[in-house]
Amino acid sequence: MADHWIRSLSPAPLLACTHLVQEPFRHVAISLTGPSDGTFQTSAELRPAAAAALTGKFGRAVIFPGVDQLVGTLTVGEILSLSAIDKVEVLGSGAADESQRLDTCDFVRPQFRFGELVLTTTPAAGGLLVPFETRYPTPCCADH
């Protein structure tokens, strides 16, 4: 739901992330960075959530520079040069080699961690990598 709302914004933000926050209650907060340095008032009850999102420690990037170019199969090096993604990691294995080929599945959602955009991937058939997060995730225990 948050992704759809973020993608409906006009003009689109330069960077838009979702953040799971606990204050003042468990919810998804959204941070937006636009082309200007405008400031907005945040209501008192949502200030703890805004502060948590602004720390930049964690977030899931929905819109970021270069996201529209990350379609099809690209090398890790191409992903790093075409977009704002700072690192590509293989789940449980560390940094991906820049020559490794990655099938983006036309859906790339890096994590914003401590000021860097990090794309987590997993190995796939044919020696490719794919993003860990998929457009249509299988719900846990779907067959129960």
Image (cartoon, rainbow, N blue to C red):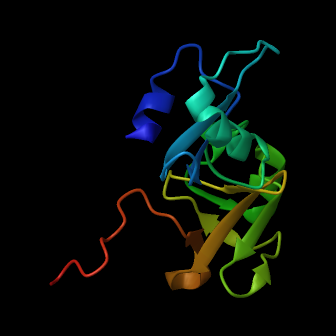
Left or right: where 91 falls relative to 98:
left
Residue 104 picture quarter: bottom right
Residue 63 appears in the picture as rendered: no
60 vs 132, nearest the viewer? 60
Compared to residue 61, the image places residue 126 above or below, namely below
Residue 61 appears in the picture as rendered: yes
Q: Residue 81 location, x and y as percent?
A: 84, 49
**Point 59% across, 78% down: residue:** 122
Q: Residue 14 location, x and y as percent?
A: 71, 28
- Placement of the C terminus among the 4 image quadrants: bottom left
Compared to residue 38, the image places residue 108 above or below, namely below
Compared to residue 86, the image places residue 62 above or below, namely above
**Point 66% across, 69% down: residue:** 120
Q: Residue 82 location, x and y as percent?
A: 77, 44
Left or right: where 57 falls relative to 28:
right
**Point 44% across, 39% down: residue:** 2
**Point 79% across, 82% down: residue:** 94
60 vs 54, nearest the viewer? 54
